[in-house]
Image (cartoon, rainbow, N blue to C red):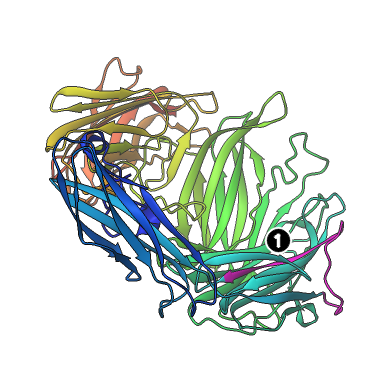
Amino acid sequence: MGSALGLRDQSIYTQGAGRVDVAAALKQPVLAMPSSLNLGLQTAPHNDDKPVTKPVTYFNSSAEPVRLSLKLNGAKLFKLSTSSLEVPPHGSATVDVTADTSGPEAEGAYGAWLVATGNGQTVRTNVGVGKEITTYDHKVQMLDRNGAPAVNDDKHVSSTYLIDVDRLAMYSVAAGESVKLPSGHYIVDGYTATVNDNGAGFSEVTYFTEPNLVVGASGPITLDGRQARKLAVRQPVTDATAAATGIGVARTVGDGNYIGGVGVDNAGTANFVPTMYVVPNRTVAPYKYTAYAHVAWAGMADGQDPGGDLYLDSPYFYHDSAVWPGQIPANPSVITDPRDYAHVDASYAGEPGYRLNNYTFPTLPQRDPSGHWVPAFVFTPAIGMNLPFRRDEYYSTKNVQWSFSNEVYQHTPEGNYEYLTLVDSAPQSYPAGRTTRVDWQRGVFGPSLPDPRIGNPGRDALPWSARDGDSLGIYVPSFADGVPNRLGDAILQSERTTLIRDGQEIGASDSRGIQTFAVPAEEATYQLTKVTKRAGNWTKLSPEISSQWTFRSKRTPDGVDTALPLLNVRYSPQLDERNRAPQGRFEFPVTVQTAFKAPVRPIVDLQLSASFDDGKTWQAVPVRRTGASGWKASLDQTSGFVTLRAQARDAAGNRVDQTITRAYEVK
């Protein structure tokens, strides 16, 4: 730990001592004991706190004395007994570190780095102390809608989360219990619920929420269900069943969001209409708080599907969403006016014998401080379908966007689910009163490196493949469908990754997913090759994908993921529900994609060729430029499979050579 390098723009709480320099650790003669110094937790109140002192001892294993300069980087309540030490050969020397918590500093945790430098080496030691936060006893009094104390038993669940906005701490408290809390501002996220007869999920819920409850030194926290209002819902068509219902909140906290809420579960009843109540919030948090409700409606199939898919092959799917910035209204409703629905003509391609779930995630049309889309849902249902399939989908359009994740799966002989591939899409806004055609699982399937914050919001905005210091971390999701900036991956039979530097192979890996390579610091030309072979027979397409990326790279700052400038060629042909194209003259869009977070350079060249015999022979395919990164390809084709090979290059010299075997079928 003492050899660690401090990482730029990161606190002691995110990096600890820093990144360990293994080479330095093996050869540096001086080490510190302890490597991390804990000065304890000082109990509240703090006006009578006494300074706490503990030693750090440096040991010198060399035959020469070492003169160390000492300094503290961090909180000012730490002091050193000396600013320098001389450590004798094969000996030791000690410095005392003192923490004085009796000053005006706020209560909480404090840390610093003790940095010792001398004779060309640096030794870092973490130092920490805690000022216990003053807390007060508060009883959580939760009343049901009749004014009786809410209970927890076999048929009822009653509890709340209390989120300390100032200190980013969360407390879970059951109704009637007491909790010790610091004074401050809190989010309330609680409910009292009736459990379904089968013991799974809730049949009825009353929801409590406050965005900015001020908690002081005394008094109970009362959540009064007598103030609840029934959430208005309505079946969009007469035989619709609520497959999922939720009500919740999004509250900005620090550089992220707290997302909370509760849902009602259908226990398998056709034409089920949910019952939910909500207590309108009394406190406000301007521009930081949004409440929402969401109901997903589907048709329930006659009889029970052996695989447990209650809504298998529903011909329709309705999503009602209500968004309430700042304040839950006195008469909350999640009923969508028919004029405010967007109609989506959704087509799902695939092979008979396989199924697909399409998960739908309502999101607010805004990002949080860290750049994530803000979710506006509690639960979203799995509505299975037999492939290929087509259905009518309807989405609310006011103050909401929709993102999607869909997965192809099958049932195993043992009755389990076997998931085969997953495709995610970015949030979409659809126009009210109009029909939009949306295709899913249509080729060409291939690598894609878009913004990772799509599909189910929550992934960090980090590059897929990056350099950090002298390490390359490689991850290339290999199986997005034909929409250019979707994200997708599949179960693979094998994955082979090879890295060449200035013509010399420096590493290879058969591991699937993420690969890591140590590389020299100096700038060089790299060739990264990845060959993936898909597992299973759920599609006839893209059984093998070969990509070779050429780029230059040199050492980058430690602790920072610097995106590698990888290009991918994406194809978007108009294919039918079995991923087949017609014979004859055929045109389709081609897009050259630059990896997320990598510098976008002009694409200066694209060459495309096609094979109708799985790569034995090739013919050039003419392409016509249609935009900065778009082309139109045109070729004459006969029945069989088309393999596509592309070479693309940008103005910085970054290049990709990519071959997708059996990219699509010609019927």
Residues 249 and 220: in front is 220
202 shown above or below 176: above
Residue shown at 47% from the left, 65% from the top: 130
Crowding around mark 1 (Cα neighbors within 10 Å: few <14, some 14 to 19, many 20+) is many
Residues 423 and 172: in front is 172
Residue shown at 22% from the left, 58% from the top: 70
Percent position of residue 370, x then y:
40, 63
Drawn side of residue 285 relative to residue 69, left or right: right
Residues 134 and 556: in front is 134
Percent position of residue 327, x then y:
60, 81
Magenta span: predominant SS is loop
260 shown above or below 467: below
Percent position of residue 331, x then y:
71, 81
Q: Which residue is identified by label 1?
A: 263
135 shown above or below 370: below
Residue numbers of the magenta segment = 144-163
Quarter of the image containing the N terminus? Answer: top left
Is residue 429 in sight in this rendering? no
Residue 74's image quarter?
Answer: bottom left
Drawn side of residue 194 relative to residue 559, left or right: right
